[in-house]
């Protein structure tokens, strides 16, 4: 929840904005989001509104020092459940599944692109995986490369949170394989896209000598 450098209307001067600090500024923002959620579906209970807001927050780390470590429930005493994300919350309120989060692309033992992600999987039926290969940033032309089931195993299915792009050869070079994921529920409603992530790609199918699988995450 915000509490530092929050833009506010000046109490002293008309047509003037300044910034304030203090966790009390979080309350009206969260209350406004709760009102927007109820404007979509007034039958939501307080618990349902609470769950939508807390499950769609961005897990921020303002200092970049991992000081704001979140517990197993996604909460920290420093910033609560994180920064509210009205766009995500209203999409979920409208019936869309939660978007996949924390997508990371790495190299597996065969030097193929390996995707791993997190999601609230109970509402998901399928994932659509999109890929782009380019030396440009950010990529423009994306292609749907796979549609996979969100659950596997019988009789006790487990959520799927990884996928291998079989046949790709990652390595060092100017070319990159970019990916993002979309979740689809049983009503065929799609989520917002996950973050994008990329890994260096050897387009000629040869392994890199230095095995430098550089990567970065883009939100």
Image (cartoon, helix red, strand yellow):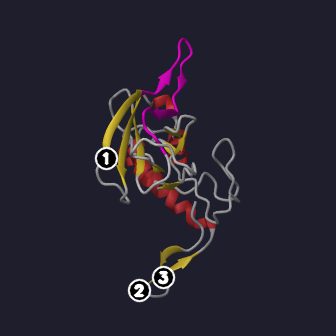
Closer to us: 8 or 153: 153
Badge 1: how crowded within 10 Å, few (<14), some, or many (20+)?
A: some
Q: What kind of element bears circle 1? A: loop
Q: Is residue 72 visible?
A: yes
The image shows residue 218 at horizontal and vertical percentages of 47, 56
Q: Tag 3, which secondary structure? A: loop
Give the labeled residue for mark 3.
10
* Vertical comparison of 52 with 164: above or below: below
Q: Would you name the residue on which mark 1 appears?
A: 142
The span from disc 1 to disc 3 (Cα, nearest Å) is: 45 Å
Closer-to-camera residue (120/207): 207
Residue drawn 55% across the image and 57% down it? 83
Give the residue at mark 2. Answer: 14
Q: CA distance from mark 3 to mark 2?
A: 7 Å
Q: Is residue 25 left or right of residue 13?
A: right
Q: Which mark is residue 200?
A: none
Assess disc 3: are there few (<14), some (14-19) or many (≥20) residues with their C-alpha within 10 Å of its C-alpha.
few
* Quarter of the figure with residue 129: top left
Percent position of residue 106, x then y = 54, 44
Q: Nearer the viewer, mark 1 or mark 2?
A: 1
Q: Nearer the viewer, residue 30 or 2?
A: 2
- Residue range in magenta is 149-170
Q: Is residue 94 magenta?
A: no
How many C-alpha atoms fall within 10 Å of the one at disc 2: few (<14), some, or many (≥20)? few
Q: Secondary structure at mark 2?
A: loop
- Position in image of residue 32 (x %, y %): 46, 57
Give the spatial CA distance, label 1 vs label 2: 47 Å
- Horizontal side of 180 relative to 154 (left or right) equals left
Q: Residue 157 in magenta? A: yes
């Amino acid at each position: 929840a915000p509490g530092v450098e929050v833009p506010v209307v000046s109490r002293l001067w008309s047509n003037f904005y300044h910034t304030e600090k203090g966790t009390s500024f979080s309350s009206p923002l969260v209350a406004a989001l709760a009102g927007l959620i109820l404007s979509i579906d007034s039958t939501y209970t307080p618990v349902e509104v609470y769950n939508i807001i807390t499950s769609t927050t961005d897990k921020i780390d303002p200092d970049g020092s991992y000081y704001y470590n979140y517990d197993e429930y996604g909460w920290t005493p420093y910033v609560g459940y994180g920064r509210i994300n009205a766009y995500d919350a209203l999409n979920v309120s409208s019936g869309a599944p939660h978007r996949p989060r924390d997508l990371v692309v790495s190299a597996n033992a065969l030097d193929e692109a390996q995707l791993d992600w997190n999601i609230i999987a109970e509402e998901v039926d399928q994932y659509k995986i999109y890929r782009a290969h380019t030396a440009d940033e950010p990529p423009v032309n994306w292609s749907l490369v796979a549609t996979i089931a969100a659950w596997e195993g019988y009789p006790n299915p487990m959520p799927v949170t990884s996928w291998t792009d079989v046949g790709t050869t990652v390595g060092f070079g100017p070319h990159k394989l970019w990916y993002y994921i979309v979740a689809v529920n049983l009503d065929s409603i799609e989520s917002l896209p996950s973050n994008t992530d990329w890994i260096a790609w050897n387009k000629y199918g040869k392994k890199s000598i230095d095995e430098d699988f550089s990567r970065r995450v883009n939100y």
